Image (cartoon, rainbow, N blue to C red):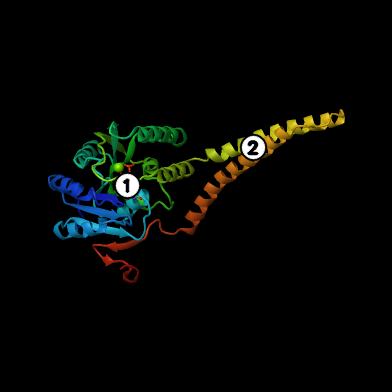
């Protein structure tokens, strides 16, 4: 039987917050008056998260646990959940209680009342985030609106509710390293939003170190814009103009018999252009890498265990 609602929860090393999360999510969902399932995606946690999940599994029939073979990242973990959720509506929510579970009910109402397929949770107040997080987030959304267009919602993260049709469309996307919050608006489904106050993380530490934030940013940019490639072209053209001017200058000085001194300018030019070339090569590499991994068409995640099915590949799972 398909539940009316699936709630997808990616979690990575969330042993501190998990009991608090379950304690709050379960009564909230029970009170909604709809049939539901919770799809907990354990993104290769190395702490007690899988043990705790097994314990909850025994006493919470609506819980389903999917464990990924390796830590594959927030976006891949959500993708794994979306790929396996069976509900008519599918919500995605963080495990750290920064997204209040009570808002899911408001999202359902908004979806039904407004006939929308995608209902974004929009952070109307993120005063509990650190100044660093707020500044980097603001920069991220500004930049994405410039290159991705006005479809991108400011401050809409991965707390949202989607219809079955939307999730089917997301699951059918062939691209890897997809940034869901950017890809979903491009699918063209009717949208609505619900504002909410972003709370502080209830326990444990952020699982989004700078390296993962950078990866998300690079995936976002290269997934949505060719602007960096064009920038590389402009650098090349600018460099060519400067080189032509310098060459003319050098030849004329030579003809006029002026010996060219100028070790400093040579070093500056050589080093400067070498750096520029490396930068452009790097930009090019990002796109080539993207083509490469899409072309390989390897799965974005590997499921090791699914509480509905048992170990998916028994030999590989201890
Ligand atoms: N997460 C994940 N895999 C990762 C990193 C994070 O599944 O590699 C989960 C994490 O457990 C949480 C959500 O993604 O449920 C958001 O992460 P976090 O709260 O650490 O990010 P922040 O709120 O600090 O941006
Ligand atoms: Mg968080």
Q: Position of residue 46 (x, y in %)?
A: 31, 57
Find the distance from the CA under tag 1 to the CA under tag 2. 48 Å
Q: Look at mark 2 in the image and give the residue it sits on.
A: 272
Please indicate, yes or no, whether residue 89 appears anywhere in the rendered image: yes
Residue 134: image quadrant is top left
Q: Nearer the viewer, residue 163 or 181?
A: 181
Query: Can you identify the residue that label 1 sits on?
Result: 166
In-front residue for pair 127/32? 127
In the image, 32: left or right of 194?
left
Q: Residues within 10 Å of mark 1 (few under 14, many from 20)?
A: many
Residue 28 at x, y percent in the picture = 15, 44
Q: Residue at x 29, y 54 (%)?
A: 41
Of callouts 1 and 2, which one flags the residue occurring earlier in the amino acid sequence?
Answer: 1
Q: Under tag 1, what secondary structure?
A: helix
Asked whether the beta carbons under mark 1 and mark 2 sit within 8 Å of each other, the answer is no
Quarter the C terminus occupies: bottom left
Q: Position of residue 153 (x, y in %)?
A: 36, 34
- How many marks the image carries: the answer is 2
Residue 317: percent from the left, percent from the top? 32, 67
- Determine whether 51 is above or below 201 in the image: below
Q: Nearer the viewer, mark 1 or mark 2?
A: 2
The N terminus: image quadrant: bottom left
Return the residue nearer the eye: 287 or 258.
258
Q: Secondary structure at mark 2?
A: helix
Category of crowding for the residue at label 2, using alpha-carbon neighbours closer than 10 angstroms: few (below 14), some (14–19), many (at least 20): few
Residue 105 against residue 253 in the figure, above or below: below
What residue appears at the point 48 percent right and 55 percent down from the top-left corner?
Answer: 293
Give the residue drawn at x 43%, y 53%.
174
């Amino acid at each position: 039987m398909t539940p009316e609602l699936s709630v997808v929860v990616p979690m990575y090393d969330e042993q501190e917050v998990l009991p608090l999360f379950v304690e709050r999510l379960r009564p909230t969902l029970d009170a909604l008056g709809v049939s539901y399932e919770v799809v907990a995606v354990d993104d290769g946690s190395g702490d007690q998260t899988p043990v705790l999940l097994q314990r909850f599994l025994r006493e919470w029939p609506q819980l389903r646990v999917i464990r990924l073979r390796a830590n594959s990242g927030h976006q891949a973990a959500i993708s794994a959940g979306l790929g396996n959720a069976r509900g008519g509506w599918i919500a995605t929510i963080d495990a750290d209680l920064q997204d209040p579970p009570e808002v899911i009910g408001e999202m359902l109402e908004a979806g039904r009342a407004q006939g929308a397929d995608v209902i974004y949770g929009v952070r109307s107040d993120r005063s509990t985030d650190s100044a660093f997080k707020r500044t980097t987030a603001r920069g991220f959304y500004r930049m994405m609106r410039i290159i991705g267009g006005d479809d991108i919602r400011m401050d809409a993260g991965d707390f949202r509710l989607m219809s079955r049709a939307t999730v089917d469309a997301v699951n059918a996307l062939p691209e890897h390293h997809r940034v869901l919050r950017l890809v979903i608006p491009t699918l063209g489904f009717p949208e609505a939003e619900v504002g909410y106050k972003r709370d502080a993380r209830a326990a444990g530490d952020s699982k989004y170190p700078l390296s993962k934030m950078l990866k998300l940013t690079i995936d976002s940019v290269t997934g949505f814009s060719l602007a960096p490639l064009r920038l590389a072209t402009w650098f090349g053209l600018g460099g060519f103009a400067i080189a032509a001017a310098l060459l003319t200058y050098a030849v004329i000085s030579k003809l006029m018999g002026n010996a060219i001194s100028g070790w400093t300018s040579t070093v500056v030019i050589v080093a400067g252009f070498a750096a520029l070339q490396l930068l452009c090569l790097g930009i090019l590499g990002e796109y080539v890498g993207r083509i490469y991994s899409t072309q390989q068409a390897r799965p974005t995640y590997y499921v090791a265990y699914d509480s509905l099915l048992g170990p998916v590949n028994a030999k590989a799972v201890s």
